Image (cartoon, rainbow, N blue to C red):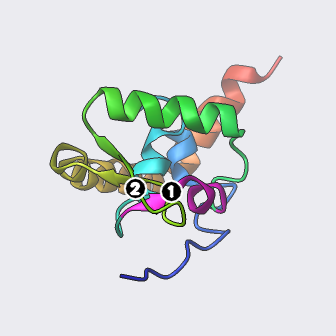
Amino acid sequence: MTRPPLPPDLFDELCPSTLLPFRFGDKWAALVLRCLEGGPRRFSELRVPLHRVTPKVLTQSLRRLERDGLVVRTVHADPKRGVEYALSPLGRSMLEPLAVACAWAAEHWDELLDAREQYTAP
């Protein structure tokens, strides 16, 4: 099954998830989960929208998600297919609370930015 490629601008630099005062796993976990929402992806596919993440950090994030049972890593016998990452049923169950958290952050965007600006102001 062929899936459309992930768009490089899937996550705007001003993505509300960067303002969440709480995390789903590590800093990048929520974005990885969103990338896998449409089905399994190879590492190179994930790198397109997650271009701000170094390969090392992306690997660490994927390993943590796998360890926590949210992502399944499949090594294919066919070298062309290589390794794919997919959401487990547990990982898929995180999509709804993640969407709610992102909607909350978008709704409170200005307040969150103001709070951070006040905190860092001299």
Q: Quadrant of the C terminus?
A: top right
Q: Which residues are magenta?
A: 40-48
Secondary element type, mark 1: loop
Q: Is residue 64 above or below residue 36?
A: above
- CB contact under 8 Å: marks 2 and 1: yes
User: Image check: 89 left or right of 33?
Assistant: left
Q: Which residue is rendered at x = 63% and y = 61% of the image?
A: 49
Q: Is residue 70 magenta?
A: no
Q: Which label sits on residue 82?
A: 1
* Residue drawn at point x = 24 percent, y = 48 percent: 97
Residue 30 shows up from this direction: yes
Question: Is residue 24 at all visible to an observer of this figure?
Answer: no
The numbered disc on residue 76 is: 2
Upstream in sequence: badge 2 or badge 1: 2
Cα separation, mark 2 vs mark 1, equals 5 Å
Left or right, 119 with respect to 4, comes to right
User: Residue 106, image x and y in percent?
Assistant: 47, 56
Q: Amino acid at mark 2?
A: His
Residue positioned 74% across, 22% down in the render: 120
